[in-house]
Every structure is written in C-alpha cells, then in structure tokens.
Amino acid sequence: MLTKALLSLLIILFSITVISAQNLIISGAVMASDGGYPIQGATINAINTNKTTTTDAFGNFRLTGLSAGNYRIIVSFLGYKTAEKEISISENQMLRFSLMPSAINLTEVTVSPNKAITQSESVTGVDKLLRPVNSAQDLLQLVPGLFIAQHAGGGKAEQIFLRGFDSDHGTDFNITVDGMPVNMVSHAHGQGYADFHFVIPETVDKLKVFKGPYTTRFGDFSTSGTGEFSTRNSIDKNELKAEAGMFDTYRVLGMVKLLDSKHLLSKEKENAYIAGEYVFTNAYFDRKQKFNRYNLFGKYSGMLNHGNYITFSASTFFGSVSDMPDIRLNNKHHQIFR
C-alpha cells in the first residue's frame, strides 16, 4: 500500500511539473530608444509558434502557454527597426526591448484580420512629411473619405465631412487631444463645436480616426466618427522654421528641447520640450482679414519605473482679427497626469 501511494504521489508530481513546463509565460516591455517612452501597438512574435501579441498603453506584453525550450522573439513597429532576441526558457521570463527609429519601408504591407483595426485609419509621421500641413486640422484630410472646408480664414473650426456626411464643426465628429475632449458641449454655433487650432501640427505624433459610431466610449458626438490626436513625448532636436505663402500668409515655428536625460530617482528616461507658433494671414477675402494666431505648448514625460510613466502637458492659444478688435479667440488647456 505504501509503495502504491508513493508511486501515485510521484505520478502526480510529475504531471504537475509537465503541466507547468507547458504553461510558461514570456512578458516584458517595449520602449522607444529616442525618448524612453512606451510604444503601444508593437507586435511581438514567437517564431515557429502561433503565439503573437501586441503591447498595451504602457508598452507591456505577455506571451502565454509556452513550453520549455528555445525561442526567437521578434518585435516590430512601423517607423522603428525590428528587434529580436534568442532565448531559452525553463521558467517564466521577462524581456525588455528598446526600438530605434528607422525609415519606413513603403513596400511593406501588413494585413490583419482584427476587425477593431479595420475600423480605424492611422495618420503617422510619414503622412505628414508627404503632404503640406498648415494646421492640426489639415491632418484630418489625410484620412480616406474625410475632408474639411474652411470658410472663415482660420478663425473658425473647419467644417468636417466624413463619407459624405456633414458633421458641421464637430457636432457629429468627436475629437480628443491626448485624451482631452475638444468638443464643446454648449456653443452658440452648435453643440459639439470643435476648434483645435490650438494644436501645433509639428507636435502631433499620430492621429487615429474611427469611422462610424462603433464604440460607445466615444460618446454622443461620434455620430459619423472620432479623431484621437496624440502629441509627441519628445523631439529629436531644436527647430526654428519660417514660412510664407499667398494672401500675405506668414508662419513662424520654434521648438526647443528642455530635458533629455535620466531621471534622478528612477534612472529611467525623461523628456521635456516647449513649442511656439505664430500665424498671420489676410486670407483670400476682398477685405483684408489681418488674422493673428499665437500658440504655445509644453510637455513633460518620464518613466517612473519599468511599468509606469507620467506625462504633463499645458498649452495656450490666442487669435484675433485686427480689423475687428471685438473678435477674440482664446483657449487654454492643461492635462495634468496620465
């Protein structure tokens, strides 16, 4: 009896060991080498297996249900060099990847069966470089099926049309900047009026547009769709730019890197920069408009530890029409912590 009980115990222990060896986890984080901030949406593949996943908003990922053995882990994300590691695991393991920026290969096409992805269009850095952009609202025109119209010379939110549907000036199109709602719930021109001229286009990292009211989290302004702007966490270098165009149009931009170093407490990367913009135009009207616009934007971002980061941003905006001194536009926004 003792021998049978001992044998049964050994079999149970062996079974537990085999099961454990077949349910290992590879977890970790994916960060950008140029800013030290997490990369959301990076693809992680375990080669020669059917295991694949993507990173969350904090750059974290998990590959589960793996057996003990050797694996080649490949991490890829548009606009960054692909990274890979050869590992051998016999227990749960944690990895950390740091991706370096690279030129985008326009011949590469990725087809995904994920329905949630097909409902959106993403506008990234390469789109902005290929087309002229005068304001953040011009980025919306890069989305197939969406176009805008301006009939007030820059002192008014653009008219938005998506798939032929007139969304007015934001009444039926939801807009956020770094998660902050832009649509004004009460406005004389119409509920949901969305003027985001306060956003400097060079500070925009990406724009994601969702077509149609597919997700209730966007609220009642997303009758035709939603636009989610994300600003850059860091800049590569200081920049000063001056532009001139027709109708006495002038624009000056300045961007200054304030911080790019290791955090004193956590030894993780932290970044800070400030950007300013001035625009003047007489527009194409018979009567000169003499429109002036001033934008100022600042942002700090830093990693607190392996899985947590913090961002703080603040901006101010002022616009006026010189021939009509009673008309003033101003907007201030502060995004405290994310």
Image: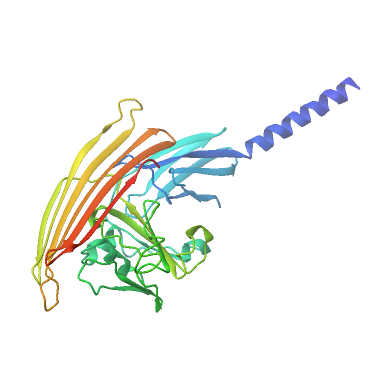
Check the image and report above or below for 160 versus 104: below
Q: Residue furthest top?
A: 2
Q: Nearer the viewer, residue 335 or 64?
A: 335
Check the image and report above or below for 222 versus 312: below
Q: Residue furthest right?
A: 1
Residue at left offset 19%, top offset 41% = 257
Quadrant assignment for the N terminus: top right
- Where does the image place residue 23, in percent across and percent down from the top left? 62, 40
Residue at left offset 38%, top offset 69% = 190
Total number of numbered discs in the rendering: 0
Q: Nearer the viewer, residue 82 or 270?
A: 270
Quadrant assignment for the C terminus: top left
Q: Nearer the viewer, residue 151 or 211?
A: 151
- Where does the image place residue 130, in percent across and percent down from the top left? 23, 65
Answer with left or right where residue 226 lies relative to residue 330: right
Residue 126's quadrant in the figure? Answer: bottom left
Q: Residue furthest front?
A: 326
Q: How is the image coloured?
A: rainbow
Check the image and report above or below for 285 versus 260: below
- Where does the image place residue 144, in percent across and percent down from the top left? 36, 72
- Where does the image place residue 120, in percent across and percent down from the top left? 44, 64
Note whether residue 203 is visible. Answer: yes
Note whether residue 47 is visible. Answer: no
Residue 184's quadrant in the figure? Answer: bottom left
Residue at left offset 88%, top offset 20% = 2
